Amino acid sequence: MAPFALTDQFGKVIAYLIYFGIGVSFGSVLEMAGFADSRRLAGQFYFRNITVLKVMFTAIVTAMVLVFLSSALGWLDYPRVYVNPTYLVPGIIGGLIMGVGFILGGFCPGTSLVAVSNLRIDALFFFVGVSAGVFAFGESVGRFTEFFYSSSMGRFTLPEWLGAPTGIVVVGVVAMALFMFWGGEKLERKFGSPQEYAAVRVLPVRIRYGASAGLMGLALLALILGQPSAEDRWQRAGTETHALLVERGAFIHPGELLQLSQNRQIKLLILDVRSEAEYNVFHLTDSRRVEMEEIDEGILSLELLNADANTVTVLLSNAEERATRAWQRLKADRVLNTYVLDSGINGWVDLFGSQALAPRAGSKPVGTMRHAFPAALGAAQPGADLDVLSHEHRQLSFEPKVKLQTKKKLGGGCG
C-alpha cells in the first residue's frame, strides 16, 4: 500500500532518477504554462492574467481528489503521507514576505529556476537575490528560533479546522476551485487588455466542462466511499499483525522493559494510557501519559511515524485491555516497534511493588487499579524507578519479544 519509500525499495540510484524525472516534468509543465514570463506571473495580482491560479489550483485540487479517493479505495495509507506542520503566525508573516517579493520580482523561487533555464536576465537577478536571502536566513534563524516554531498547530488540515468529514471538504474545495476559475476568467476580461486576454490559452468549452465534471465526479465518489475508519485500517493491517495479538508477540515481560530502559542504542518511549488520577497515584519513571483521544484521532500515530528510527514504544494500562486497544489503533496506522506491557501496571506492582501493598479487598471492574496506595506519589512510589529496579532484578528470566524494525520515514514538501 502506498506511500512507498522509494530509496528502500529501489535503492538510491533508481530513487534519485525517479525524483529527477519528476522534477524535470514539473519544470516542463511550468514552462509550458508560461511560468517563465514574469509579466504573466505578476499579472495575477492585477487580475489581468489568472494563469497561475488556474494551473496551480488545478494541480492542488487534482492531487487532493486523487489522494483521498485512493485512501477511500484502500490504495493509500493517508496517515503516513507527510503534511507540513502548521506554525500559524510565522506562516502568515512568511507568506506576506513571499507575496510582496513575488509582486516586486515577478517570480517565486520555483518559477525563477524555470525562467533561468530559459536564460531570462530578470530571473537570473531574482535567483541571485533568493539565494542571498536563503543564505542570510540560514545564518540568522538561530536568533529567532522561538518565534520560528511559535503558534505550532501540528498537522492541521481543513477537515480538522472545519470539523467536517473529509469527503465534504473535498467536494467543497473542488466546487470553490471551479467557481474561482470561472470568476478568474471574468476578471481577465474586465481588467486585462484585449491583447493580454487574447494571449491567454483557453481550452475548448467541451474539454473544460468535461474535465470539470470528471473532477467533481471523482470528488463525489470519494465522498460516497468515505475515508477508512480505524477498524477498517486494522482489518487491512494484515494477518501477520493480527497474529502478534493472538500469539501475544506484542506483549513484553516487565523484565524486558527494564532491559530496554538501560539500552542506549534505542529511544524508549513509555506511554501510559490510564486516567490522570491513576497516573498521579503511581507511574513509572520517564513514562508519559497520553489521552485515548490522542490515539483515536491519530495524533499520536503522526508523532510516532515521524519519530527516530530507533524508537521503541511500550504502552501501559492497569491491566492490558486499554493498552491493547491503543496498540491496535497505532498498528492500524502502520506504526512500527510498538508493544504492550504484559499484565499492565497491576502485574508490575505485583512483581516490583512494596510488600506492604496488598490487593484491594473485593472484586474490582476489569481495567482498574488492583492495589491500594496510601498516597498519590506518582513515580516516587516503591517499584517505579526503572534504573533502581534494573540493577536489583538483573537475573529476571523472560522471552525477548522486541525486534527493532526499520522505520521508513516519508518526507515531502515544496521549495
Image (cartoon, grey):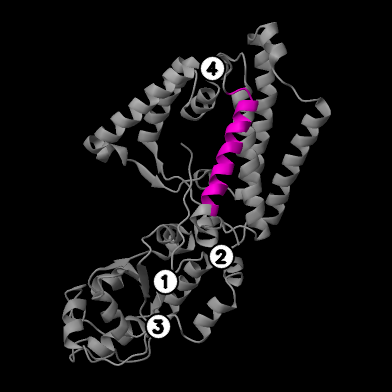
Q: Residues within 10 Å of mark 4 (few under 14, many from 20)?
A: many
Q: Secondary structure at mark 4?
A: helix
- For badge 3, the amino acid type reads Lys
In which image quadrant can residue 152 be found?
Answer: top left
To which quarter of the image does residue 114 belong?
top right
Q: Earlier in the sequence, mark 2 or mark 3?
A: 2
Q: Secondary structure at mark 3?
A: loop
- Distance from the alpha carbon under mark 2 to that under mark 1: 19 Å
The residue wearing badge 1 is: 337
In the displayed structure image, the side of residue 326 where residue 182 appears, left or right: right
Circle 3 residue? 401
**Which residue does the image show at 29% across and 85% down from the upper left?**
255
Helix, strand or loop at mark 2: helix
Q: Which residues are magenta?
A: 14-35
The percent position of residue 273, horizontal first and vertical second, equals 37, 70
Q: Give how far across and how far down residue 189 sits, in percent.
A: 69, 12
Tell me the CA gap for discs 1 and 4. 50 Å
**Residue 101 colored in magenta in the image:** no
Q: Residue at x 53, y 67 (%)?
A: 332
| Residue 31 - label | none
Mark 2 vs mark 3, CA separation in Å: 25 Å
- Labels 3 and 4 touching (C-beta < 8 A): no
Disc 2: which residue: 230
